[in-house]
Image (spheres, rainbow, N blue to C red):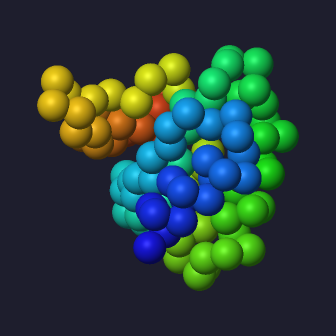
Amino acid sequence: MCRTLLLLALKRKFARILCCLYQPLTFASNGDELPRAYIMPQSPDKATPETAENIKKWLAERVSRHKRLEGGVHFIDAIPKNPSGKILRKELREKAALEDTKARL
C-alpha cells in the first residue's frame, strides 16, 4: 500500500518528480529496517532538502508509523533498471550499505 501511495500520490502532489521508489533497508548498526525513498526529480535544482522534508512530512501524515520514511529521502539521477525495465533494488541496497559504512568511519 505504501509503495502505491508514494508512487501515485507523490507524482500528483509534487509534479517535479519523474520517478520514485520506496525501498526498505536494513542498517547494520542496529539491524533495524527503515523505509527510504529514492526520487528522480525532473531537474537537479528541484532536489533540495526542503523538498525532501516536505515529502517526508506529507507521507508521514498518511501512513502508519512503521511505513514512514525514517531511512530518508534520497534524490538520484536515475533509478537502476535492467533492459526489461525491472528496478534493480539490489544495487540500491548495496549503495545504501556503502553509505552506512562511510557514515560510521
Q: Is residue 55 above or below residue 40?
A: below
Is residue 4 visible in the rendered image? The answer is yes
Q: Is residue 102 left or right of residue 15?
A: left
Is residue 94 visible in the rendered image? The answer is no
101 or 35: nearer the viewer:
35
Labels in figure, total: 0
- Which residue occupies the extreme bottom position in the image? 64
At a point 33% along the width and 28% down the height, the residue shown is 80
Q: Is residue 20 left or right of residue 72?
A: left
Tell me where residue 83 appears, x and y as whole percent: 17, 24
Tell me where residue 14 appears, x and y as whole percent: 72, 45
At a point 45% along the width and 53% down the height, the residue shown is 22
Tell me where residue 52 appears, x and y as whole percent: 72, 43
At a point 67% along the width and 19% down the height, the residue shown is 43
Q: Is residue 61 above or below residue 76?
A: below
At a point 54% along the width and 57% down the height, the residue shown is 8
Q: Determine the image quadrant of residue 98.
A: top left
18 or 45: nearer the viewer:
18
Name the quadrant of the N terminus: bottom left
- Which residue occupies the extreme right position in the image? 50
Tell me where residue 82 appears, x and y as whole percent: 19, 28
